Image (spheres, grey):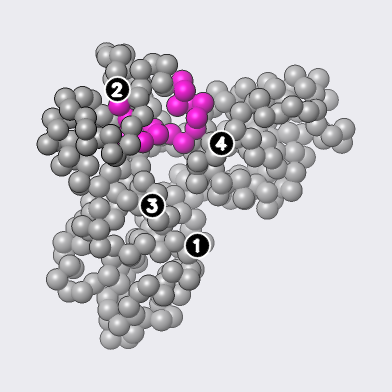
Amino acid sequence: MVKVTIDSGSGFCFGVVKAIQSAEHELEQTDELYSLGDLVHNNLEMDRLKTLGLHTIGHADLAHLRNRTVLLRAHGEPPSTYELAKKNQIKIIDATCPVVLQLQKRIHRCYQETKDTGTQVVIYGKKGHAEVNGLVGQTEGTAIVIEKLEDIEKLDFQRNIVLFSQTTKPLDGFGEVVEAIRARISPDVTFQYFDTICRQVANRLPNIRDFALQHDWIYFVAGKKSSNGQMLFDQCLQANSRSVFITSAADITEPLPEDIRSVGVCGATSTPKWLMEEVADRVKTLNP
């Protein structure tokens, strides 16, 4: 008999829970609400919210919207978004994650204090990611984004550097960037760095590795657009080669190999619990 276990540490992080609750609360009072970008990188959860009246729009759509209510998701937005909303008389429901909001304020303050000194504000993060766009916006678009170790070649090591991190980046990657800059920086300038990685997300990396090791087979459930999901799945795969990435229970079409006795179901910070439960039920149905 196959035993199926859902990872208690997987599922929505605090920021995503807050954003979804904000949307649901507003939709209880109105039948129309706009979300600037996907509220969560999971198509099935977005479909559920759509049935409640949530419409997803892009930044280009925002420019043409007037007198509507728009929810800003957990990733946060640059100041230009708030300015445009005010101009177009758009009511904002701000569901920016508190951790991201605090980081935006820190970067903005740092930029204001150092912009006349030639200091380079650097962000370790994924270029083009919604959160990173919001962080770069705090520096009037001047922050330098370091996505991988080789990107430090963009920096001028003869000028001051202040380094921050996107909240969902891995701790070990941030440490590598810090050490690489420290090894290259001129002794005549300063290098400051701030570990601004969310521990609720960072701690999932070692936890999900441990979970994957405890089972014969892993179904990792996430949306294809979730960068956090891809990062966590990579950790599962490293720990357990019999890890499979799926987006829904419908992706499971065959019974498991006969030698499988223990199956773990886990997911990203954007994966709803109800979806992992559906996957667990599907596994039990196909493997009675």
The residue carrying mark 1 is: 173
Which of the two marks, 3 or 1, is nearer to us in this view? 3
Mark earlier in primary sequence (1, 2): 2
Q: Nearer the viewer, residue 266 or 9?
A: 266
Query: x%, y% of residue 149?
Result: 48, 68
Residue span colored magenta: 33-48
Question: Badge 3, how many Cα within 10 Å: few under 14, some, many 20+?
Answer: few
Q: Secondary structure at mark 1?
A: helix
The residue carrying mark 3 is: 128
Q: Secondary structure at mark 4?
A: loop
Query: x%, y% of residue 178?
Result: 42, 70
Tag shown at residue 222: 4
Q: Total number of numbered labels?
A: 4
Q: Secondary structure at mark 2?
A: strand
- The answer to whether marks 1 and 4 mark residues whose Cβ atoms lie closer than 8 Å is no
Q: Is residue 152 above or below residue 158?
A: above
Tag shown at residue 99: none
Mark earlier in primary sequence (3, 1): 3
In the picture, which quadrant includes the N terminus?
A: top right
The residue carrying mark 2 is: 33
Which of the two marks, 1 or 2, is nearer to us in this view? 2
Which of the two marks, 4 or 2, is nearer to us in this view? 2
Question: Badge 1, how many Cα within 10 Å: few under 14, some, many 20+?
Answer: few
The answer for how far apart the CA atoms under marks 4 and 2 are is 25 Å
Which of the two marks, 1 or 4, is nearer to us in this view? 4
Mark earlier in primary sequence (1, 4): 1
